[in-house]
Image: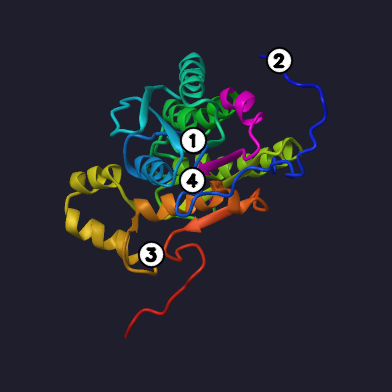
Amino acid sequence: MTADPTPSTDPTPPADPSPAPPEAGRPFAGLTALVTGGASGIGLATATLLSERGARVACLDLNPEVPQPLLGLSADVTDDASVRRAVSAAAEALGGVDILVNNAGIGAAGTIEDNPDEEWHRVLDVNLLGVVRVTRAALPWLRRSPAAAIVNTCSVAATTGLPDRALYSATKGALLALTRATAADLLPQGIRVNCVNPGTVDTPWVGRLLAAADDPAAERAALEARQPTGRLVAAVEVAEAIAQLAGPGAGAVTGTALPVDGGMHSLRLRTPR
């Protein structure tokens, strides 16, 4: 059927072309999100939260077993071809990419003398270059989004000197600098870039570290004591911060590092007498 070219005399005003406001409790309705390291810990908590608030979410992980309605895709952030395949598959399945959460990462212990060059390369390859690869692959879709946002999972180790964490801190310090530089580069394209700086988070990875300690209870108590709140950060608390930075309500926020560390980076409390 062809359209009638005769102008309408109907006095009804045209429909408002602006997007509908977000549904109550579902601020991410109509948006798509890609979360790396999304099958456990902070990544799974973030993917679940975004999904509950309306987003269609794909989780990229080495072992991508995730509950429905999350979409799990296998990806190795140290392999550019693997990353590009997974990001393309996610964009095709979801209908684009509006939000990218670069969460995949690994830990490392030791002073500057303790790790060989090979370990430095391995951890940098995941924690820094992994973010580069995934962001690069997602940019063609992010550029098409009217609500594009990238949130990187950094660490309090990027801003606070922690003992026995030289390699890990170096990778997260570099990621903080990369976050700000990328925010400056992508601002003219309408893409916001921020990061969260968690303290020690109660995740399966931390649980494995504690289990391997000589005295797991004492080690956990020490980790809790170094955070002013006296407890580990919950993964869902980091997820809430990521969602805040990624959401449409944070349109004026870019180049920001949001601490989620129980005050660890800034508070110096007196020891009780």
Label 2 CA crowd tier, 10 Å (few <14, some 14–19, many 20+): few
Residue 41 seen in this snapshot: yes
**Residue identified by numbered label 4:** 169
Name the N-terminal-most of marks 3 and 1. 1
Q: How far across and down, in percent of the image, does residue 24 sit?
A: 48, 54
Q: Residue furthest bottom?
A: 273
Q: Residue at x 57, y 39 (%)?
A: 150
Q: Earlier in the sequence, mark 2 or mark 1?
A: 2
Q: Position of residue 190 (x, y in %)?
A: 71, 39
Alpha-carbon span between mark 4 and mark 3: 17 Å
Q: Give the mark toward the camera: 3 or 2.
A: 2
Q: Which element type, helix, strand or loop, lies under badge 3?
A: loop
- The first of marks 4 and 3 along the sequence is 4
| Residue to which mark 3 is pinned | 227
Crowd around label 4: few <14 · some 14–19 · many ≥20 (10 Å): many
Q: Kindly state the secondary structure of the residue where label 1 is placed.
A: strand
Residue at 42% across, 49% down: 239
Tag 3: amino acid: Gln
Label 3 to label 2, Cα distance in Å?
Answer: 68 Å
Q: Is residue 112 visible?
A: no
